[in-house]
Image (cartoon, helix red, strand yellow):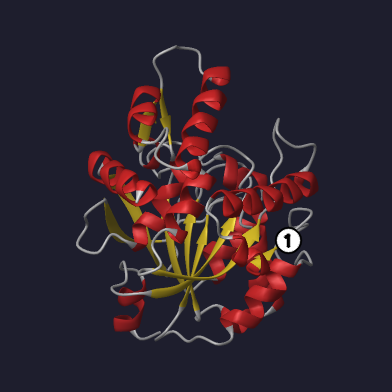
Amino acid sequence: MDMNTLYKNLTPPKGRIDCVLDTDTYNEIDDQFALAYMLKLPEKFNVRALYAAPFHNDKSNGPCDGMHKSYDEILKVLGLMGREDLSGIVYKGSESYLPDENTFVESAAARHLCALASEYSAENPLYVVAIGAITNVASALIMQPDIADKIVVVWLGGHSLETGNTMEFNMKQDFAAARVIFRNAEFFVQLPCARVVEHFSVSAPELREYLVGKNALCTYLAENTIEYTDARHPVKHWAKPIWDLTAPAWLMNDGGRFMDTKIIRRRFPNYDGQYNTGESSKLMGYVSYIKRDFLLENMIEVLTK
């Protein structure tokens, strides 16, 4: 691997990029922010496809149900934005998690990613922004290993290396898929949740002040967040992490405006929820700090324009 190409692809890109978004949109409230943020910035993101990812929590009865609900939620957000014209680039993803690290799960999303990524190269990669269980992307890498150096995977998943475990929601749903990404993706950037991304949070007063009433999309995002968090948070005066928006924001991070990234050797996640103590020879991008206020100001500006 040419080191100049490697370092370039582990650094936020300048100019407009071709990208896809892989999202478990109905899982919580933050995927909707990430989706809207990307579509509101056509000068930066040429969004080639939107993939529905599986999830399983109290909002679904299994990964299949979660994926189908996420697919419907993507369409709902497109409707709120008046972008129904993009419904043709929305693809259903995996109905289950990987059974092991060598067996893919068939889906329209994985097949489309294989075909699309084949159009790119290490020098001109496709950016894959993933903000859920990474089953679809791992399946594509197993289906067609030669796309491994044609994509840059930017994944919000796992916890920080300092946390003590990596039992984070996106990762623990499909450890096999996470391990495929850590092993096979040539260009990989991780945004860890605990101690890093969790610091990008917003409160109910801020949502009411800056988003409610600005447009149909902003009102939905704000009210959905408030309703969701009021029902789950143990205290009245909460601040809710908007985890997933940080992944596309990394691609806007030229000059380090919104977060700090370092290049480190990979430490693979194990099935017991711990990172391997040994380091891989492969390098990866690793987000270590979020500049909350600067990113929040940018998010509000983009979503309300």
Numbered marks: total: 1
Give the structural element (helix, strand or loop) at label 1. loop
The x, y position of residue 181, in whole percent, is: 56, 64
Q: Can residue 279 be seen in this view?
A: no
The quadrant of the rendering that contains the N terminus is: bottom left
Where is 143 relative to 194, above or below? below
Nearest the eye: 79 or 36: 79
The x, y position of residue 229, in whole percent, is: 52, 24
- Left/right placement of residue 41 relative to residue 231 reads left
Crowding at dot 1, Cα within 10 Å, few <14 / some 14-19 / many 20+, comes out as: many
Nearest the eye: 6 or 127: 127
- Left/right placement of residue 114 relative to residue 152 reads right
Q: Residue at x 52, y 19 (%)?
A: 230
Q: Residue at x 79, y 45 (%)?
A: 65
The x, y position of residue 104, in whole percent, is: 75, 67
Q: Is residue 97 visible?
A: yes
Amino acid found under the numbered disc labelled 1:
Lys
The image quarter containing residue 272 is top right
The image quarter containing residue 42 is bottom left
Nearest the eye: 286 or 107: 107
Where is 226 relative to 214, above or below? above
Q: Residue at x 36, y 46 (%)?
A: 304
Residue placed under numbered mark 1 in the picture: 92
